Structure formats: structure tokens, C-alpha cells
Image (cartoon, rainbow, N blue to C red):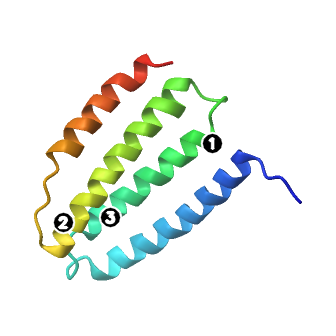
Amino acid sequence: MIALDIRTILFGYVLTNIVSTIVIIELWHQNRRRLNGASLWVADYILVTISLFLIILRGTVPDWISIDLSNTLVIIGTLLGLMALERFTDKRFFFFFFFSGSHLLSLTLPFEH
């Protein structure tokens, strides 16, 4: 059985995310006037792809970039994805707990390593 390195798996995931981001950008370009929240989905995919790429660069870039910045980008991307879902479904969600928890997490992450 072939044992894959975690960086190899992450690299494949980044490539898949890049293709997905390109597809989402193309869908946004075609349907931006008809779909509410499509621009937020594009921003979500871009931020998550960048954060995964920063995680792969761990060891070659400073830790605050590969850990803190990438985690912050994932949190912001997830918030944008939730906001896009809210606009797409025309339903209001209660983001207070997620938003406050993500702020606390982004403030405490730099002090843990």
C-alpha cells in the first residue's frame, strides 16, 4: 500500500480547490445579476484556497503566516460563505455566537505557539 504524505494530500486538495474556485468565478460571472450572494461565495472560495496554500508552505514561511493568517482566512471565508447562504436562501441567520467565537479565536491563536 502506498503511504501518502500529508503535504501531498493537501496539495491535491489545493489543486481541487483552485479548479472549484475557477468554476465558481465563472458561475459568478454568468449569474451575478440573478444569484444573490454569489460574490460572497467567490470571496469564500478564494480565501479558503489561499489559506490552504499557506498551510502547505508551513516550514518555508514564518509560523504566523502559515498558522495565524491561514486560520484567520478560513474563519473569514467561512463567515462569507454563511453570509452568501443567507442571501441565497433569503433567510436571516443569527451569527452572533459564531462571529464572537471567531473573533476570540483569532485573538488567541497568535499566543499559542
Mark 3 element type: helix
* x then y, percent, for residue 65: 50, 30
Question: Is residue 93 shown above or below 55?
Answer: below
Q: Amino acid at mark 2?
A: Glu
* x then y, percent, for residue 91: 12, 69
For the N terminus, the quadrant is bottom right
Q: Do the residues bearing badges 3 and 1 touch, measured as CB atoms within 8 Å?
A: no
Residue of label 1: 56
Residue of label 2: 86
- Between marks 3 and 1, how big is the CA–CA gap? 23 Å
**101 left or right, relative to 9:** left
Q: Do the residues bearing badges 2 and 1 touch, measured as CB atoms within 8 Å?
A: no
* x then y, percent, for residue 76: 32, 46
**71 left or right, relative to 10:** left
What label does residue 24 carry, if any? none
Question: Is residue 111 shown above or below 44?
Answer: above
For discs 2 and 1, the disc positioned in front in the rendered view: 2
Mark 1 element type: helix
* x then y, percent, for residue 20: 50, 69
Label 3 packing within 10 angstroms: few (<14), some (14-19), many (20+): many
Mark 2 element type: helix
Marked residue nearer the N-terminal end (2 or 3): 3
**86 left or right, relative to 77:** left
Rendered residue at 57%/24% (across/down) = 62
Q: Amino acid at mark 1?
A: Ile
Rendered residue at 55%/25% (across/down) = 63
Question: Is residue 104 shown above or below 97?
Answer: above
Marked residue nearer the N-terminal end (3 or 1): 3
Q: Do the residues bearing badges 2 and 3 touch, measured as CB atoms within 8 Å?
A: no
Rendered residue at 33%/31% (across/down) = 105
Residue of label 3: 41
